[in-house]
Image (spheres, rainbow, N blue to C red):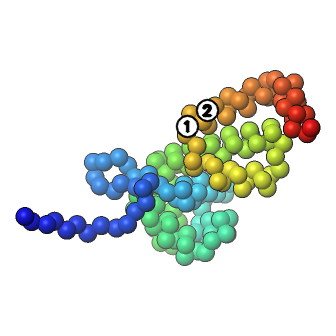
Amino acid sequence: MKTLFVKARLISADAPSTIPGLMPPKPSQSAEDYLERIHELMEEKGYARVVDIASSLGVTQASVTSMVQKLDEMGFVNYEKYRGLMLTDEGRAIALKIHHRHETLARFFSLLGLDKETQGKDIEGLEHHLSGSTIECLEDLSRFLEQNPGTLNQFLEFRRE
Protein backbone atom coordinates (compact mmCIF):
# COMPACT_ATOMS: atom_id res chain seq x y z
CA MET A 1 0.00 0.00 0.00
CA LYS A 2 1.38 3.40 -0.96
CA THR A 3 1.06 6.34 1.37
CA LEU A 4 0.50 9.74 -0.14
CA PHE A 5 1.89 12.72 1.73
CA VAL A 6 0.49 16.12 0.91
CA LYS A 7 2.11 19.38 1.87
CA ALA A 8 -0.62 21.36 3.59
CA ARG A 9 -0.99 24.46 5.66
CA LEU A 10 -3.10 24.76 8.75
CA ILE A 11 -6.29 26.67 8.10
CA SER A 12 -9.36 27.39 10.16
CA ALA A 13 -12.67 25.68 9.51
CA ASP A 14 -13.96 28.81 7.79
CA ALA A 15 -10.73 29.51 5.93
CA PRO A 16 -10.72 29.99 2.20
CA SER A 17 -10.48 27.26 -0.32
CA THR A 18 -7.83 28.15 -2.85
CA ILE A 19 -8.05 25.00 -4.94
CA PRO A 20 -9.00 25.91 -8.52
CA GLY A 21 -12.50 24.90 -9.50
CA LEU A 22 -13.83 24.95 -5.96
CA MET A 23 -15.82 27.70 -4.29
CA PRO A 24 -14.05 31.06 -4.10
CA PRO A 25 -12.15 31.69 -0.88
CA LYS A 26 -14.13 32.82 2.15
CA PRO A 27 -12.31 35.53 4.06
CA SER A 28 -11.70 35.28 7.79
CA GLN A 29 -13.42 37.69 10.16
CA SER A 30 -10.24 39.73 10.32
CA ALA A 31 -10.02 39.83 6.52
CA GLU A 32 -13.64 40.99 6.35
CA ASP A 33 -12.81 43.81 8.79
CA TYR A 34 -9.90 44.87 6.58
CA LEU A 35 -12.05 44.76 3.43
CA GLU A 36 -14.75 46.84 5.12
CA ARG A 37 -12.21 49.42 6.32
CA ILE A 38 -10.46 49.58 2.94
CA HIS A 39 -13.82 50.24 1.28
CA GLU A 40 -14.68 52.95 3.84
CA LEU A 41 -11.33 54.69 3.29
CA MET A 42 -11.76 54.54 -0.47
CA GLU A 43 -15.22 56.08 -0.14
CA GLU A 44 -13.92 58.82 2.20
CA LYS A 45 -10.61 59.66 0.51
CA GLY A 46 -10.67 58.00 -2.88
CA TYR A 47 -7.78 55.72 -1.89
CA ALA A 48 -6.60 53.45 0.90
CA ARG A 49 -2.95 53.38 1.93
CA VAL A 50 -1.35 50.89 4.31
CA VAL A 51 -0.56 53.68 6.77
CA ASP A 52 -4.21 54.83 6.79
CA ILE A 53 -5.56 51.31 7.26
CA ALA A 54 -3.10 50.68 10.11
CA SER A 55 -4.01 53.93 11.83
CA SER A 56 -7.76 53.39 11.55
CA LEU A 57 -7.64 49.77 12.74
CA GLY A 58 -5.04 50.38 15.46
CA VAL A 59 -2.58 47.83 14.10
CA THR A 60 0.96 48.02 12.75
CA GLN A 61 1.75 48.75 9.14
CA ALA A 62 3.52 45.39 8.95
CA SER A 63 0.28 43.65 10.00
CA VAL A 64 -1.66 45.53 7.34
CA THR A 65 0.91 44.71 4.68
CA SER A 66 0.76 41.03 5.59
CA MET A 67 -3.05 40.97 5.44
CA VAL A 68 -3.19 42.97 2.22
CA GLN A 69 -0.79 40.50 0.60
CA LYS A 70 -3.08 37.64 1.71
CA LEU A 71 -6.13 39.50 0.39
CA ASP A 72 -4.29 39.97 -2.90
CA GLU A 73 -3.52 36.24 -3.09
CA MET A 74 -7.17 35.46 -2.40
CA GLY A 75 -8.31 37.81 -5.16
CA PHE A 76 -10.02 40.42 -2.96
CA VAL A 77 -7.59 43.29 -3.64
CA ASN A 78 -5.03 44.22 -6.23
CA TYR A 79 -1.92 45.29 -4.36
CA GLU A 80 1.41 46.56 -5.59
CA LYS A 81 4.05 47.46 -3.04
CA TYR A 82 4.53 51.24 -2.84
CA ARG A 83 1.73 51.82 -5.34
CA GLY A 84 -1.36 51.17 -3.24
CA LEU A 85 -4.28 48.86 -3.50
CA MET A 86 -7.72 48.57 -5.02
CA LEU A 87 -10.60 46.29 -4.13
CA THR A 88 -11.55 43.75 -6.75
CA ASP A 89 -15.24 43.31 -7.56
CA GLU A 90 -15.35 40.31 -5.21
CA GLY A 91 -13.57 42.23 -2.45
CA ARG A 92 -15.94 45.16 -2.87
CA ALA A 93 -18.97 42.84 -2.69
CA ILE A 94 -17.74 41.37 0.61
CA ALA A 95 -16.95 44.83 1.99
CA LEU A 96 -20.42 46.07 1.08
CA LYS A 97 -22.06 43.00 2.66
CA ILE A 98 -20.19 43.54 5.93
CA HIS A 99 -20.91 47.28 5.81
CA HIS A 100 -24.62 46.54 5.31
CA ARG A 101 -24.60 44.15 8.29
CA HIS A 102 -22.83 46.80 10.37
CA GLU A 103 -25.36 49.49 9.42
CA THR A 104 -28.32 47.19 10.09
CA LEU A 105 -27.06 46.35 13.56
CA ALA A 106 -26.26 50.02 14.31
CA ARG A 107 -29.76 51.05 13.24
CA PHE A 108 -31.36 48.36 15.42
CA PHE A 109 -29.20 49.08 18.47
CA SER A 110 -29.84 52.84 18.11
CA LEU A 111 -33.58 52.20 18.21
CA LEU A 112 -33.04 50.30 21.45
CA GLY A 113 -31.23 53.31 22.90
CA LEU A 114 -27.80 51.69 23.25
CA ASP A 115 -24.87 54.12 23.43
CA LYS A 116 -22.37 54.30 20.56
CA GLU A 117 -19.54 52.67 22.51
CA THR A 118 -21.65 49.66 23.42
CA GLN A 119 -22.95 49.48 19.86
CA GLY A 120 -19.44 49.49 18.43
CA LYS A 121 -18.25 46.65 20.65
CA ASP A 122 -21.37 44.56 20.13
CA ILE A 123 -21.49 45.09 16.38
CA GLU A 124 -17.87 43.98 15.98
CA GLY A 125 -18.70 40.87 17.96
CA LEU A 126 -21.85 40.02 16.01
CA GLU A 127 -21.60 41.19 12.41
CA HIS A 128 -19.58 38.18 11.24
CA HIS A 129 -21.71 35.57 12.98
CA LEU A 130 -25.30 36.36 12.04
CA SER A 131 -26.96 34.67 9.09
CA GLY A 132 -28.42 36.63 6.21
CA SER A 133 -31.89 35.62 7.43
CA THR A 134 -31.23 37.09 10.87
CA ILE A 135 -29.95 40.34 9.36
CA GLU A 136 -33.09 40.57 7.20
CA CYS A 137 -35.24 39.95 10.27
CA LEU A 138 -33.45 42.73 12.18
CA GLU A 139 -33.93 45.07 9.20
CA ASP A 140 -37.66 44.28 9.16
CA LEU A 141 -37.95 44.70 12.93
CA SER A 142 -36.13 48.04 12.76
CA ARG A 143 -38.43 49.25 10.00
CA PHE A 144 -41.47 48.04 11.98
CA LEU A 145 -40.34 49.88 15.11
CA GLU A 146 -39.66 53.05 13.11
CA GLN A 147 -43.13 52.86 11.55
CA ASN A 148 -44.71 52.13 14.93
CA PRO A 149 -43.12 54.57 17.38
CA GLY A 150 -45.80 53.84 19.98
CA THR A 151 -44.71 50.20 20.13
CA LEU A 152 -41.06 51.23 20.37
CA ASN A 153 -41.85 53.68 23.16
CA GLN A 154 -43.80 51.00 25.04
CA PHE A 155 -40.78 48.73 24.85
CA LEU A 156 -38.38 51.46 25.96
CA GLU A 157 -40.68 52.30 28.89
CA PHE A 158 -40.88 48.62 29.80
CA ARG A 159 -37.08 48.47 29.93
CA ARG A 160 -36.94 51.47 32.27
CA GLU A 161 -39.23 49.80 34.81
Q: Which residue is mark 2?
A: 136
Q: Residue at x 38, y 49 (%)?
A: 24
Q: Nearest the camera: 87 or 111?
A: 111
Question: What residue sits 68% from the left and 50% below the top?
Answer: 123
* Image: 104 above or below 124: above
Q: Residue at (47%, 47%) from the top-left corner?
A: 89
Mark 2 and mark 1 in contact (Cβ < 8 Å)? yes
Location of mark 1 (residue)? 132
**Whether residue 72 can be seen here:** no
Residue 148 picture quarter:
top right
Q: Which mark is residue 50?
A: none
Give the answer, above or below, for where 22 lies relative to 139. Answer: below
Residue 121 lies, in percent from the top left, at: 72, 56
Image coords of residue 111 (percent x, y): 80, 37
Quadrant of the image for the N terminus?
Answer: bottom left
Instruction: Classify 10 Å Cα crowding around label 1: few (below 14), some (14-19), many (20 and above).
Output: few
